[in-house]
Each structure stands twice: as C-alpha cells, then as structure tokens.
Image (cartoon, rainbow, N blue to C red):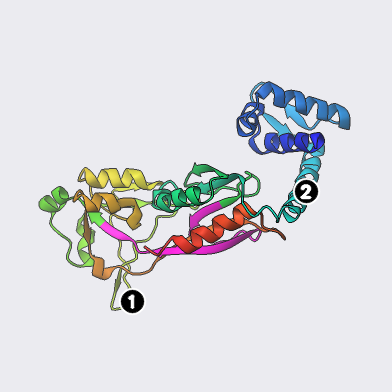
Amino acid sequence: MEKLGTLGIFIQVAEVGSFIAAGHRLGISGSAVGKAIARLEEELGVRLFNRSTRSMALTEDGSFFLDTCRRIQAEYEEAQAKLSRSQSVPRGQLRVSLPLAGMLLMPTISKFMSAYPQVNLDLDFTDRIVDVIEEGFDAVIRTGEVKDTRLMSRKLGSFRHVIVASPEYLAVNGHPRVPEDLVDHRCMHHRFANSGKLEAWPLVRDGCGIKLDLPITTVASTLEPLVYLAQQSFGITCLPPFAVAQEIGEGKLVPLLDDYLAGTGTFRVLWPTSRFLSPKVRVFVDYMAANLFSI
C-alpha cells in the first residue's frame, strides 16, 4: 500500500509538473512530495524528472514509468471498486471541470452534494479545452460534440441562444426588428478559445439559416466580458441563456429577435473510457443526466 501511495504521488507530480502543486492536490507538503520522488528514483535507479530552478519535465524513463503507473493504479482502483460493491455508498474525491459559465449547473450540483455527502467535489471552472486524462479529471462538463475517442459521453440537456442588449442601448440606437437590422448595430462576438473562430449567431427565417456579414465591434474568448459590456450599452451580443438569465430577469438586458433564432447547444458530461466505472463517477453522471433538465 505504501508503494501504491508513492506511485500516486509520482502520477500527481507528472500531471501538474510541480512538487508544491502536487502536494496541494494530495494535502501534504511539497517537501514531502520531493522526498517521496527522490526515494522512488533511488529505488528504481533512474531519474524520473529533469529539474531546473524554473521547471521540471519527465525524462524518457519517467514517461515510460508514468504509463505503467497509470495502468497499475487503474487496475488497482478497478479491483478495489469491484471488491467494495458491498459498500453501496459512493465516496472519495471527484474532480470535475466545468465551463466558466457553468453556474447554471450549480443548483443541480449542490443537490448532488446533498444526496452524496461522502463524495468530495473538486470543481475547476475554465473555458479552455482540458485534457481529461492527462490532467486527472474524473468528469468534464462541456457544450458541443465529443471528438476525443478516449472519452465516454452522455447528453445532459439542450439550450437555445439569445440575442440581448441593454434598454439604454436600444433607446439610443433603436430595436432591431428583423435580422438584417443587425448590420447597423454594434455587434459583440464570442470567440472559441480552442479554434479562434467566432461563434455564429444562429439566425433563421422560415426554417432556413440566414447568413449576414455582421459588424464585429468587440470580440471576447469568454462570456463574462460580453455580458458586462452589453449591460454598459456597448452593443448587442448573442449568448447562451444561462449566461444572461439573471440580467434579463432584472431588466438589465432585453432579449431580441427571438422568432429568428434556432438551433440548440448541448451540455454533455465526459469521462475517461474504462471497463469499470467507479461508483462516484457513475452516480455523478446518472444524477446529472436525470436532474439537469433542458433549458
């Protein structure tokens, strides 16, 4: 068991590239992590990391050993999970990555926490594309389609975008009544961080898509700046509804052109492919799928 613990420490260091960061994950000091790695290298008779004052990286032997350790850890966890089926209560730390605008999910997640108090959630909010396996996430919630063949996925819910502007902006610049009116307005766009492409505004008429050369007055790679700037009357923007639901409810933003919007976004939960799904991941996936309704 002690050796398994050391292998776990090595995996964490390899994933985060730092003794201190690994210690934070494990709840021990960075010096304790460094000593464990030093003992492991001495036992193996190889150097696992190339270290400098500013960075550390796996050696070739370290990369080989990391793959082996992950396989050993996965097989141990699988065996442990099978043997512990009699303990029907899921437990342990569950690392989940969510988009920055994932506050939509928090009511459901908080109910999950109440239903499974022995599962300790470690929530990471980011809009970047994370490497689920390399970064050690148990589950990731994102929008869009799944392209990583190493991952399983399940649909959680769908949503439709909304075009919004502040009442003050509309008082000065007028309400767009049809999509073509948008070409005379200050349009603020969301750019996908992974591809650098602007997110299209899903405009339609009579079931057919409308392609317009919309003005590009502002671009942001996350949603929050666009919400703020829209409230400050800098222009019109198109966002998923959960990003502006509160502002619309408070009258700070006004929805526009609802009859000309179509298409849905999709929330999915992703997790590493495995022959055996751990109880904590299984109940999280099942709970989110059952309780996160379409928006």
User: Residue under circle 1?
Assistant: 208
When asked about the image quadrant of residue 178, the answer is: bottom left
Q: Is residue 183 magenta?
A: no
- The amino acid type, in three-letter code, at marker 1 is Cys
Please state, as top left, top right, bottom left or bottom right, where the C terminus lies in the image: bottom left
Up-down: is 138 above or below 144? above
State the residue lying farthest toward the front. 86
Image position, residue 201 (x, y; %): 34, 62
- The amino acid type, in three-letter code, at marker 2 is Tyr
Q: Mostly what secondary structure, the magenta segment?
A: strand
Magenta residues (range):
140-163
Lateral position of residue 270 relative to residue 52, left or right: left
Image position, residue 70 (x, y; %): 75, 46
When asked about the image quadrant of residue 134, the answer is: top right
State the residue lying farthest toward the bottom. 206
When asked about the image quadrant of residue 211, the answer is: bottom left
Is any part of residue 268 visible from this angle?
Answer: no
SS of the residue at dot 1? strand
Q: How far apart are marks 1 and 2 (CA)?
A: 53 Å
Q: Residue 192 carries which label?
A: none
Lateral position of residue 135 relative to residue 161, left or right: right
User: Residue under circle 2?
Assistant: 76
Is any part of residue 79 visible from this angle?
Answer: yes
Residue shown at 74%/56% (left/top)? Answer: 82
Image position, residue 223 (x, y; %): 36, 48
Image position, residue 16 (x, y; %): 64, 35
Kindly check if marks 1 and 2 are in contact, taking CB atoms under 8 A apart as contact.
no
